[in-house]
Amino acid sequence: MEQSLAKKNQSSFSSPILNPGSINGVERTSLGLIGTTEKANFSVQFYNEHIVRVRFSRSAFTPDLNYAVVAQPESGLQDFADEEEWFVLTGTHYSVHVSKATAEVRFVDPKGEVINQDEPGLGTSWNGEQVTTYKTLQPGERFIGLGEKTGPLDRRGKGYQHWNTDAFAYGPGSDPIYSTIPFYLGVHSGLVYGIFFDNSAKSFFNFGASNNRTSSFYADTGEMNYYFLHGKSIPEILSAYSWLTGNMPLPPLWSLGFQQCRYSYYPDQEVINLADKFRQKEIPADAVVLDIHYMDAYKIFTWHPEYFPHPEKMIHDLASKNFKVVVMCDPGIKAEEGYQAYDEGLRENLFLNYPDGQPYTGQVWPGWCHMPDFTNPKTRDYWRKWMKSYADSGVRGFWNDMNEFSSWGQMMPENILFDFEGQMRTSREGRNVYGLKMCEASYDGAKEHLQGKRPFILTRSGYAGVQRYAALWTGDNVAYDEHMLLGVRLVSSLGLSGVPFSGYDIGGFVGEASPKLFARWISIGALSPFCRVHSMINSRSSEPWSYGEEVEMIARNYLRLRYQLLPYVYSLFHEASVTGMPVQRTLAIEWPHQDEVYSGAFENQYLFGPSILVAACDSTKELVKVYLPEGGWYALYDGKYFEGQQILATDSPVHRLPVYVRAGSVLIMQDPVQSTEQKSETVHLHIYPGKEGSSFEWYMDDGETYGYQSGACVTRTLHSENGKVTLSASNGNFVPAWKHIRVVLHGVSDGGSMMCNGKHVKTETIQHSYFLPMLKFDPLESAPDVGSESVQQFVIPYTPDEVVIAFPPI
């Protein structure tokens, strides 16, 4: 009775919501369909075998600007059928059904299972200028990704907004914050898919919040323009998304080291003293980051005449200590006659304007400023040219901040005009892409002026595709445990959204971390893609030694571990630059249908590459639960073996973050070093036997130039199976500096039957630890135990030829 009444009401209901109506004409293309409905234009076209683009507009389609999308369509269309009720486009992996009566779209796998579909009766529609697509909520459906979004890993039941915002001291549930990456993944019924909504206006995503019928995505203005991605696995979808929006460039090796920042280090002698102290204390580090006080009156492209009278000399002195310099780059150009960057920008009309032609003026650090219009190619040329002054001083890293963009009051008028490559839009569509286009100009300028050396660009704000130019950090976080774990989830979510190089301010930017919190945070941060400490003005110092002797030792140990792992980490970044696979990987990537992965108790766990499981946890907890997925796992500290698919209660004292190594893997490591400039002569192969096999591509180049693009690089595959590890012969023209290979076998008490290249080898039994022993600080208590294990090892000369290592299987 209720259902029939609902249908009667539905048939007679008059709505202000505008739907496309029925299809009244189509044109077949090599990619799919372009057509018209009663009230709209539409197209459904394959981009490749994994990706279909769907567009709806009430007027003619706008020309593509391709700010996010760089791929050209290749087609994955295999077949077309004109059925009674549907047009059916069949691709390699799935088919797309378009309703003739309503233009609603559904995506179906070869078995006939619905992957994703428009909600019948709703589909795509307009509410005034606002355009929305409603999707049917599938039973048990989960939603992950969506870029830099706070909250839980599984976003089911939540709603989010994309509007790039300077979110100082944002909370664990704040939304929006700094960046817009409108790409998410859906998981249900053993299936996975992705949707990228490419509309730079203010947009919204509702994953079943306040309703039990639909998920939806909508924008305040512009077209409905989304890309549907499907594959057998999440890595396959991430690879397709990175193909669509571009892969990250291979970063310089030094940028993967530790970076120390403060708001602010000055004068120049303090910066030199800081570098000296890192070296004296033997805490590995590669960069000092200068916040706004290095500038003259906070004006970009200047140096403070008293604090930094001779920047070239300071940077040269730091280079002699193996430190690089990264500088803050804010977009605001102080409106001051005689300031050359201002005079040129005003003369050439390179700033954002009001509709009456007057430049927009907002207050930022230097005072009243004009904002460069980075959607204007002439402005990007101007910015690239000005970056030469930094490069000529020896600066190697460029930190783009305040680029949401931020101005005091945080209420940029929405009538400001953006050039948009000559197509002219307002800030309604320009705000979310501002940071992306600033990063493009910064990257291109640095690349042009660094004389063949790879730049490092860091940004606070961006849009989809920002990975092509910059690493991203999660802004002004706060010094407490919940925020530390939120940062872990943010980085995991960014990894799901095409941004492999990301991180957070270790220790928290706002507030002051306790010694325990800083110790826990730096242990997690050392096993994250981007590793930087940063703290706010008028707060305590946040160098590793400023929290006491015990915390200093903990920081030294974990940063030392990061530097030992750099051959492994650099290989992960190479993989990310080729496939889009993130460096930090939520467990949902490999086990998307496991309930435990989404549990509040385990959602902060992640894989650092394929082999290292990190269980990020609260600094105040010394006993925590850890979920071990299927397979075998070794505890990092004592080598104890555990079968997977179980929940463990494990000790988590502040000096021992729960970390596990996957059985069957090989960790490629090196000797401890103090910076990436210091070269290790010995490469270490840490073998963790397991019934499961693994394969890992070890990548090497000079870590600094673009020589790898012309073949000056080497790859070697490490293939592991139960009882044997094969290191393939070198493939490439680069000659690494290794002199020795140290093989370390974990989990085997007797190495007497080990063989290398068909010959028995004599092994040595040693007590192994990745960490230096903790000192005894309290005479009434014993020193904290970092753990150790008995392992078998042998050393052979480094060879570019194949190496086969055999050992007792387990």
Image (cartoon, grey):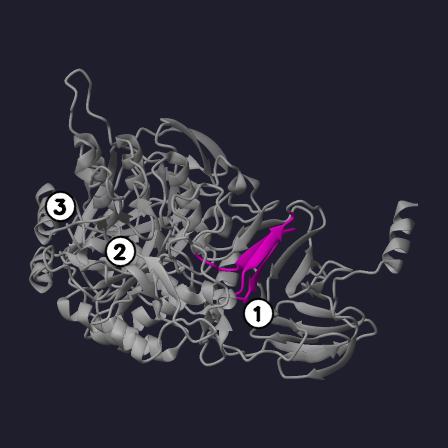
- Numbered tag placed on residue 51 in the rendering: 1
**Where on the picture, by quarter, is residue 391?**
bottom left
- Numbered tag placed on residue 256 in the rendering: 2
Mark 2 vs mark 3, foreground winner is 3
Quadrant containing the C terminus in the rendered view: top left
Question: Going by the image, does 737 lie left or right of 184?
Answer: left
Mark earlier in primary sequence (1, 2): 1
Question: Going by the image, does 689 lie left or right of 729?
Answer: right
Identify the residue shown where x is 32% and y is 80%: 348
- Quick one: SS at disc 1? strand
Find the magenta span and give its range.
179-208
- Quick one: SS at disc 2? helix
Q: What residue type is labelled 3?
A: Phe
Mark earlier in primary sequence (3, 1): 1
Q: How crowded is mark 1: few (under 14 residues within 10 Å), some or many (20 or more)?
A: many
Identify the residue shown where x is 51% and y is 36%: 600
